[in-house]
Amino acid sequence: MPFRSSIFRLVLPLILLSATAFTAAAQGTQVGFGNPDHDSSLPVEVTADQLDLQRDDGKAKFTGNVIVAQGEMRLYGDVVDVRYGDNAAGATEIEWVHAAGNVTLFNGTEAAEGDDAVYTVDTAIVVMTGDVLVTQGDNTMSGDRLTVNVDTGIGQMEGRVKVLFNPEDRPERARPQ
C-alpha cells in the first residue's frame, strides 16, 4: 500500500488546486481567467502603426504593433480587424475585434497567447485559437481553443488540454542523516 499512499499524497494537492483554479469539465477544462473587476462597457482604445478604414462598411484594419485596451485588459496582435457600428444612442462603438498573429491577451495578472483571437465587446467573450497557452502565476494550461468571459473570468479550454500545476511553497522536509 505504500505506492497508493504516495500517489494519494501527490494527487490530493492537484485535486485541491484544480478545485480552486482549474475545474475539469467533460468537453474540456474550465479555467478561471481574468480580472473580476473588468468592465466591458468601458471604452475600447486601439493603437497601431497603420490604420486602413472602410467607413461605409464599418470596418477598420490596424497593422503593426497593435494594442487593444479596455480598462486593464490588453490585447496585442500583428493585425487587428475591428467592426464598429452605432449604438442605440447613435454613438459609434466597437462591436468586435479580431486579432491575428502573435496574439497575447493580458487581463489582470494573467496572460493568454495564441495565433488568433476574437473579442466580442457586448458579450465580453474572447475566443482564442491556435496553440493557446494560459499563464496564471506559476501554473500553465495549453490547448487548441480558449473561450473566456472577461467580465466573469469563467472560461473553457478545449482540444488536447495540458495543465501544469506548480504547488505552493512547501515546508522543507528533513533529510535523513
Image (spheres, rainbow, N blue to C red):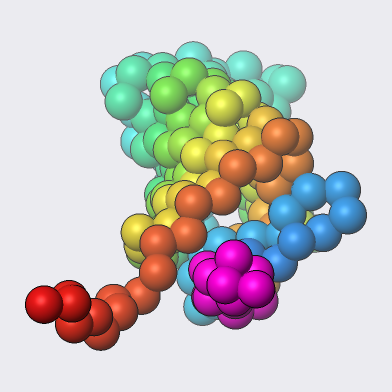
* x and y, in percent, of residue 149 in the image: 68, 60
Q: Nearer the viewer, residue 86 or 33?
A: 33
Q: Quadrant of the C terminus?
A: bottom left
Q: Quadrant of the N terminus?
A: bottom right
Snapshot quadrant of residue 131? top right
Answer whether residue 165 is magenta in the image.
no
Q: Would residue 123 appear left or right of 107 to someone viewing this image?
A: right
Answer whether residue 11 is magenta in the image.
yes
Q: Residue at x 79, y 48 (%)?
A: 28
Task: Give, as a single range, the part of the protein colored magenta.
Answer: 1-19
Q: Please tell me whether the stretch drawn in magenta is mainly helix, strand or loop.
A: helix
From where the camera sits, is residue 84 visible? no
Q: Nearer the viewer, residue 95 or 134?
A: 134
Q: Residue at x 59, y 65 (%)?
A: 3
From where the camera sits, is residue 13 visible? yes
Snapshot quadrant of residue 31? bottom right
Q: Residue at x 70, y 21 (%)?
A: 56
Q: Nearer the viewer, residue 124 or 177?
A: 177
* x and y, in percent, of residue 100 in the image: 54, 22
In the displayed structure, would residue 150 be above or below residue 51?
Answer: below
> How many tags in the picture?
0
Q: Given the current orientation, which residue lies at the most extreme right position?
A: 26
Q: Residue at x 30, y 79 (%)?
A: 170
In the displayed structure, would residue 132 be above or below residue 7?
Answer: above
Q: Given the current orientation, which residue lies at the most extreme left position?
A: 177
* x and y, in percent, of residue 115 in the image: 54, 24
* x and y, in percent, of residue 96 in the image: 67, 40
Snapshot quadrant of residue 58? top right
In the displayed structure, would residue 75 be above or below residue 83?
Answer: below
